[in-house]
Every structure is written in structure tokens, then in C-alpha cells.
Amino acid sequence: MASLTEIDYYLLSKPDLSDNTRKTYKKCYDNLSDLMQTNMINEETQADIYNKIKTIENPNTQQMYINIALIIKHFHNNKYEYLEKKRELIRTDIKNKRNIRKKEKKDELPDYEDLQRFTREMLSENNYRSYIINYILTEYNTRNKDLDMQIVDNNKSYRELKKKKDNVLFVSSSGKNYFTRSNYKTYNTYGQLNFEFNNIKFNRAVKAYMNQQREKGVETIFLLSKEDGSRIGEDSLSHYITKYTLDNMTESDYNKISVSRIKSMEQYNILKQISERRGTSVPTLVDEYNINIYT
């Protein structure tokens, strides 16, 4: 039986941590141990840890590793002030690189109106899958995983899928649409997200898409599916979705465009709505996605 590592002892002392957080900490610790070629991070000097971490090119990865080193040092009541100062330098580097990317994106990305126009075009061309994907991306600011959903047209199936904590879109006979997400990135923070909205065009387009699938003999209908109707694998979501977006843009680009249309505090309600629909805090939206604001 393998002996417990430093991170194992730390995790045992923190029973309230979520499973996802535990997995993240464990993976980062294992990667840092491999980098340092030791499973006793606490015994390494702060300078040695930092110098090794700086050999990693990505500053976001540097920050993850230095956070783990700080956790270990702090847990063992060891000195960590030097690493804290270096972490601030890494954070500054991350902000600077983010601002550079924002400036580049500002010149590259289309306007929000372009996304809406493209969405309407997909409907007029009867490209129902593309229309649904683009409508949800623009109106509900979702990530890729959120679009990995089953589509149903009866209330019983909808209730069952909600209980199973799957992502599901239910189009009712009355024309009302119900969109529920349980399998998404920030579920542990925001819980199950449920939205109801009236849009007859959307409702009819989804039903038309369902009919297309049923004509091919598909019984269980997914928005993101292969030719035979089977669900797309999670590792293929990004590549699959960009085939249906304007200029093959990513969901992150769509969200940047959506957030960046907000020019003043008078539009704060729009930003708040995006936050609620995406499951992301307002500060994160401003820092990470508004290409007009440099932090």
C-alpha cells in the first residue's frame, strides 16, 4: 500500500473540500513533485521551488504550482513569505498577458449584433443544430460542456433528467422552453441552473431538429451528436461546437463579445444577467472577458 504524501495529509485535515478541489490539488501536487523530483516539497527551499516553477512557460500553471507549494509550507508552519511575494509577480505577469490578449481580441472579434445576425441566418437556412447552438451561446453565455445536453418534448422525461443532474432542454407543446444545467464547470458554486423562456421560433426550431433526428431512427436526442445520433465525447466538444459558430469562434470568444458590449454602469443589469446565466461572478466576467477593460 502506497504511503501518504504531504498533500494527502493536508487533504485529510480539510474534510469540507469538494471532490473536484481535492482532485485539482492532488494533480498539481503530483506535477510539482515530478518537476522538483521529490515528494517532500516542504523540505525544499523557497528559492529552489520558485526557480523550478519558473522553468514552466505558462504563468497560469506557475501560479497553480506555487499555490500548492504555499499550501504545503503553510500546513507545516514553515516559512512561505518569499513564495508569496513571487506569486504576486506571477499574478502581475498574468494580468499583463491578459491585457495584451484583450487588445488583440478587440481588433479581431466581431460585434454582438454580428452573432445575432448569424444566428438568425442559421434559422433561415433551416440549419437547426447550428441555430440552437448559437442561440444558447449568445443568449445564455454558456461554456462548451453546457451544450452537451439531451433534448426532450415531454415533461416526464424532463423531470427524470433533472433528477439525474444531466443537462436537458425541454420544449413544451405550449411553446415554452425549459433549459436546465447540472453538468457544468461551476456547479459546486451555483448549483443546478434552471431557465424558462418563451420563444416560439426557438421552440419550433428545436422540434424541427428533433424530427430530423427521429427520421434517421434516433430515439434519444442530443444537441451535440454524431451522424448515428450518439453523444459526442467530452474531449471533442470544443472542436465539434466551433464547426457551427460564426468564423469557427470558441465559446470564450462569444462570451467576450457578449460581455464587451457593456460600456457603462447603466448596463450593469445585463452584466448581472450574464453572470447568472453563465454561472460566473461579475468580477471574473470583467477581468477575464471584457476586452475594453484592462486590469
Image (tube, rainbow, N blue to C red):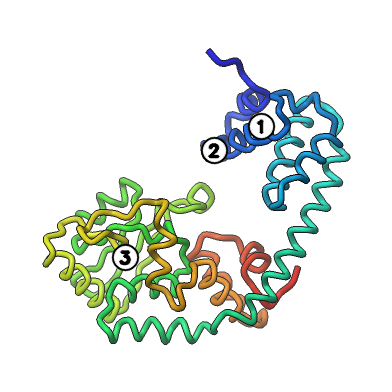
Residue 157 location (% of width, % of height): 21, 54
Secondary structure, mark 2, is loop
Q: Which residue is mark 2?
A: 18
Q: Nearer the viewer, residue 29 or 177?
A: 29
Secondary structure of the residue carrying tag 1 is helix
Where is residue 240? Give x, y as percent. 38, 63
The residue identified by callout 3 is 178
Mark 3 and mark 1 lie on one chain; the one further toward the N terminus is 1
Q: Which quarter of the rendered picture does the C terminus lie within? A: bottom right
User: Who's the residue at 49% across and 86% down the image?
Assistant: 113
State the residue at coordinates (53%, 40%): 20
Residue contact between numbered discs 3 and 2, judged by CB atoms under 8 Å = no
Quadrant location of residue 248?
bottom left
**Helix or strand or loop: what does disc 3 sit on?**
strand
N-terminal of the two: label 3 or label 2? 2
Say whether residue 278 is left or right of residue 84.
left
Report the residue that reaches farthest toward the top.
Answer: 1
Q: Amino acid at mark 1?
A: Asp
Label number found at residue 34: 1
Query: Could you tell me how many numbered marks the image carries?
Result: 3
Query: Callout 3, which amino acid?
Result: Tyr
Is tag 1's residue or tag 2's residue first in the polypeptide sequence?
2
Kind of residue at badge 2 = Ser
Query: Is residue 238 depicted above or below 113 in this figure?
Result: above
Q: Is residue 122 above or below residue 232?
A: below
Q: Dot 3, how many residues are within 10 Å of its Cα: few (below 14), some (14-19), or many (20+)?
A: some
